[in-house]
Amino acid sequence: MLRVSGVQDAWWEMLPEQARQLPAELSLVDAFLDDERFIAPWRAVFAERLGRPSVPVETLLRLLYLKHRYQLGYETLCREVADSLSWRRFCRIPLASPVPHPTTLIKLVRRSGAQTVEELNAALLGKLVEDKLLRCRKLRIDTTVMEADIDHPTDADLLEHGVRKLGRLVGRIKASGAARRTRFRDRSRSAGRRLKEISRTLRRRTGQALGEIDRLTGEIASVARATLRDVAAVERNARRTLRKRPSGRLAHLVDELAETAAGTRRLLEQTALRLAGIRTIPDRLVSLADPDARPIRKGKPQHPTQFGYTALVAEDERGFIVDHQVQRGNPADAPQLVPSVQRVVSLTGRPPGTVVADRGFGTAANDLALAELGVQRIGLQRAGKPGKARREHEQSRPFRRMRNWRVGVEARISHLKRSFGFRRTRLRRLAGAQTWAGMGIFAYNLQRMTVLSR
């Protein structure tokens, strides 16, 4: 059941005034969030009258701001709020009431999803436009990689993980009373032993080690194939039990088993291609825990290949993030430019006077489309060797000034990664990455608003 606000606590008035005062930043954020437009997105998440009362939305919003503003884990967040008078007052939690449990906050974030967070960001940007804090006369756009919360993947490691997870799921299904008499051999130890042999082989760093690694990887693949044969029988008999005796928990376990088995089969196909000498595999699966993550190459010497999602960031001249998108894989930059500018136009009601981006966005079609939208100054460098007219245009003083201003978006992305959790998403799958990025942007724009409002 939806609860917008909590109970008013009279005990706060008994404290000295210095203990009741909020820090300047929290005071501005507290006043800014007192708007119905930040409550509206949560009305679709909770029923108005049915169910147990939820954590008050005003409390939840402020807790999530503190979490992403200071990059705290849920347990640390709840402990710090319980221990701080100013944070407790900012979150509007009475002195005699307990702070919400960390698992409650985790469930609420997962339940809200990417759509609710997107609506929150839209409401925040709309209010900034109304307050004339966001004008968006200039716009600079770039893409970056948001890493998934996974280890560096290898074929052998992924297959061993698949074997372990399948064995664990089959054990839970059998404990639930399904497929008890179906034969299944847990080969987790067999796969793990070969994985340890690979790690010992790598320490030798000899030419013969590569051939031995391929041999051991092939043996782990054989173990995974044998496991999948047993899993097929377990899944078939478990579904037969479900038809006779429906159970939500068992249905969830069987669906997870089928999904993991499908992912393991895909890993076997990738491993067979790699052992055959094919190193470039399109749309490669790099994790069973986060199947939407993909390998991404951005040409960075220190990180030639990263694993996660591609994030587009559009920043205006005052430092607000006016548009962001998180996508699977590594889509081309150029097709993302015009839709991003169009979203900014629909937000502010007018086109930005200046749009700049790097060479990945620079095409003649984008220059023409931006001119049709009403953008007056376009600073898109072209890839390849430019002609004489284009070279003179890119060497002119106005273009060089736009190019120099564009470089600042790299610093903004670095700031988001260092201070607002944009480096690595702690939520899995594409929807989780979009939720994580959206909450980071929400906290960043609120903090930026406090800087410009002082």
Image (spheres, rainbow, N blue to C red):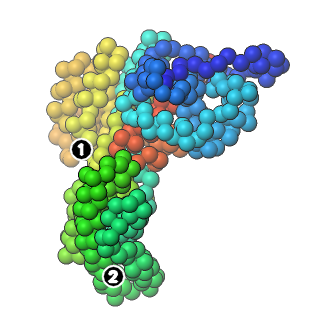
Residue 105, percent across and down?
54, 37
Q: Residue at x 82, y 20 (%)?
A: 15
The x, y position of residue 434, in whole percent, is 38, 39
Image position, residue 311 (x, y; %): 36, 41
Q: Earlier in the sequence, mark 1 or mark 2?
A: 2
Secondary structure beneath label 1: loop
> Which residue appears at 32% of the width and 64% of the height?
179
Q: Which residue is mark 1?
A: 332
Is residue 42 rendered to the left or right of residue 431? right
Query: What's the residue type where badge 1 is placed?
Result: Ala
Pointer 2 local density, CA inside 10 Å: few below 14, some 14–19, many at least 20: many
* SS at mark 2 in the image: helix
Above or below, 72 relative to 129:
below
Q: Which numbered disc covers residue 216?
A: 2
Residue 208: where, in percent of width, then height? Answer: 34, 88
Q: Residue at x 40, y 43 (%)?
A: 433
Q: Nearer the viewer, residue 140 or 151?
A: 151
